[in-house]
Image (cartoon, grey):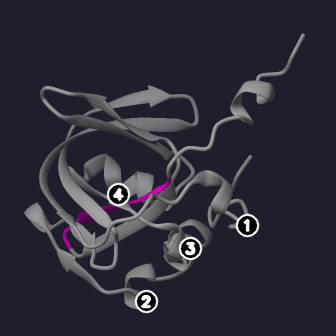
Amino acid sequence: MPDVEGFVGRLDPEMCVVTAAAGEERSGCLVGFFSQCSIRPVRFMVWLSTANHTYGLARTAGRLAVHLLTPEQHELAALFGGECGEQVDKFARVPWTRGHGGAVVLEDAAAWFVGTVERQVEGGDHVGFVVAPVQWGERTGGRALRLHECLDITPGHPVD
């Protein structure tokens, strides 16, 4: 019987950086599991690994910021995908600002939105966050960074 990897291996999803903030604490990570999940009203689903530092903060943050990067922003993707927020202050290395409700917005992202978390859905080793956009911006055009362009990034959190 064929392995599910034959299906999964064909996928090349767009990547994003998700940030969460609660008070003065902030965290962010590179995410490959996200998608628009409703047209009216517009909603997105962002899946965070339960092993990831950002997940712990996102559970109580109330809002998340979702950032699209271009292929030229691989270094930014590597920072948020290859470093662990428990060990490194990623935000000390990049320009950022506060968005709606205190959300952390990466100033160099190609496009971004801040959304309120409407619900969380258990999904194995990831938890999905349904996010309703309330603020957004765009800095530059171009296509979004994809998974195949990030395969050289070693995850900053433990992977089983």
Tell whether position 138 is magenta: no
Q: Name the spot of residue 139 as percent of width and height, x first.
A: 25, 73
Residue holding disc 2: 93
Residue at the far right in the pictured view:
1
Determine the secondary structure under disc 4.
helix
Mark on residue 57?
A: 4
Element under disc 1? loop
In the rendered image, which residue does mark 1 sit on? 152
In the figure, residue 99 lies in which quadrant? Answer: bottom left
Q: In this view of the protein, can residue 86 be seen by the observer? A: no
Give the alpha-carbon distance from disc 2 to disc 1, as whole Å.
20 Å
Locate residue 121, reporting x and y percent. 38, 28
Up the image or down, 14 lies above or below 128; here it is below
Residue picked out by circle 3: 74
Q: CA distance from mark 3 to mark 4?
A: 24 Å
Q: Nearer the viewer, mark 4 or mark 2?
A: 2
